[in-house]
Amino acid sequence: DAKTTQPPSMDCAEGRAANLPCNHSTISGNEYVYWYRQIHSQGPQYIIHGLKNNETNEMASLIITEDRKSSTLILPHATLRDTAVYYCIVRSSSFSSSNTGKLIFGQGTTLQVKP
Amino acid sequence: DAGITQSPRYKITETGRQVTLMCHQTWSHSYMFWYRQDLGHGLRLIYYSAAADITDKGEVPDGYVVSRSKTENFPLTLESATRSQTSVYFCASSDRTATNYGYTFGSGTRLTVV
């Protein structure tokens, strides 16, 4: 699965949009971009995923560039409860004998939402 | 209760002892995973299982043993615990038929080896 690069930390003012970037320049055609977050001491939580189209759900929006080499997770109105480590992960969605679609976590971005 | 549960939440054990961490999910998900998380290392995959009786190594399998006799359970055993295995352990499950192929994680087990 392709590697990802994220900034180690970011700050965001409460109520403002948080834009978290991720580079995945070696992504291949059948690989999806997934975002998870981990609030202190809790298990990681799935946020959103996409292949090439922009995606939106109740938690966030995912913007993937046309060449698919980078993406941005957008939290439209960040709250203090959004303070967490955010992980961008690229993996195949297919469960084959050679690739179970394992999630391999990097270091992520620590987002600090400030009042 | 529906979901994925880990037990115990906290465990202290002595070096050399065998300890088993339990993971139980109620969805009949095919895939289950064990991760460990240490300060400065993020989450690392220990073992995973594609179905009952099918398991395989992840990134850091040494010193661990898993089994999966039933779909809903995926215990992780440290055969002879070492201090380097002090960590927070997370279990996760995933349904291969789910549209998002997302993982659902448990709340974790904090293990201290003294």
Image: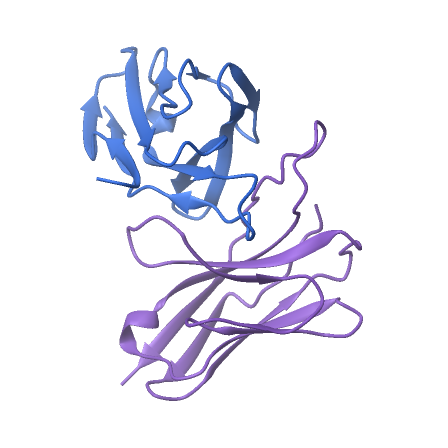
Chain colours: A purple, B blue
Q: Is residue A62 left or right of residue A109?
A: right
Residue under the image location 30 percent in, 57 percent down: A40
Residue under the image location 72 percent in, 74 percent down: A65
Residue B53 versus residue B60: which sits nearer the camera? B53
List x then y, in percent, for residue A88: 56, 59
Q: Is residue B22 left or right of residue B66?
A: left
Image quarter of the N terminus of chain A: top right
Q: How many marks?
A: 0
Quadrant hosting residue A7:
bottom right
List x then y, in percent, for residue B99: 56, 51
List x then y, in percent, for residue A114: 31, 82
Residue B79 vs B76, above or below: the answer is above
Quadrant hosting residue B87:
top left
List x then y, in percent, for residue A110: 43, 65
Residue B113 vs A38, above or below: the answer is above
Residue under the image location 65 percent in, 36 percent down: A95
Image quarter of the C terminus of chain A: bottom left
Residue A16 vs B45, above or below: the answer is below
Residue A27 versus residue B95: which sits nearer the camera? B95
